[in-house]
Image (spheres, grey):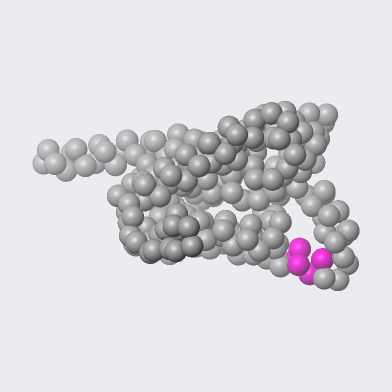
Amino acid sequence: MFPLKDENPTSRLTWMTWTIIGLDVAVFAYELYLQATAGAGALDAFYLTWAFDPAHLASSAGSPAVWVTVFTAMFLHAGWLHIGGNMLYLWIFGNNVEDRMGPWWFLGFYLVCGVVATIAQTVASGFADVPTLGASGAIAGVLGAYLLLFPRARVLTAIFIIVFFEVALIPAWVVIVVWFVLQLGSGIATVGPASAGGGVAYFAHVGGFVCGVLLALPLWFASRRRAAFTAWR
């Protein structure tokens, strides 16, 4: 299943979501420029400087530079598919979560989910000396909040069946739960030596998602109280 768009209008301009998307795209454009003008070696050096390396945290936990990379790594991407998929998910699900939280709370929520996702992947990898980068951990947190706050929203989804695919409107909770189960299963499958070899940071997705659900709980409880009060009146 691959989401294409949701049918869940917002009540205001969700400019923070677009700002985050713009920053990600701008950094990726710089990566392309760096690779085109200075070569792959310069791009690798850029990644080594600004991506997060769990081994550096293990050896220099008190270094501010190491903790800076926890945040800068969220705005780096390793290719067109990487940034394309992440920005699509953020565009589909981020605006409604921001609409419910407000822009500045949403920014804080997004960054906290990204930090928790990074820590989860770091622990799962055994502090491996493998740089991590990408916004997917923070975006997983957005999916967790969306699941809690808008489970019945409908999502236009491409469903691939071998070589054929169909487009259908599916409840958000189905799309997101299937996504989470796939991430969790894939993460469990990589436990062991394979987890230190690079690739998709599945436990970052799991950690970010759980963090997003937990952080969205107060909003969920508030909406339930409002609904109960309205029904009582």
Q: Is residue 3 visible?
A: no
Residue that lies at the very extreme toward the front in this rendered image: 162
In percent of width and height, residue 54 lies at: 75, 35
Q: Residue at x 41, y 42 (%)?
A: 177
Chief secondary structure of the magenta portion: helix
Q: Residue at x 12, y 38 (%)?
A: 232
User: Is 129 on the left or on the right of 143, as rendered?
Assistant: right
In percent of width and height, residue 133 lies at: 70, 48
Find out whether residue 27 is within the magenta segment. Answer: no
Give the magenta-colored segment's residue range.
30-35
Quarter residue 190 falls in? top right
Quarter residue 77 falls in? bottom right
Q: Front-most of 229 and 175?
A: 175
In percent of width and height, residue 121 lies at: 65, 35
Find out whether residue 34 is within the magenta segment. Answer: yes
Q: Is residue 166 visible?
A: yes
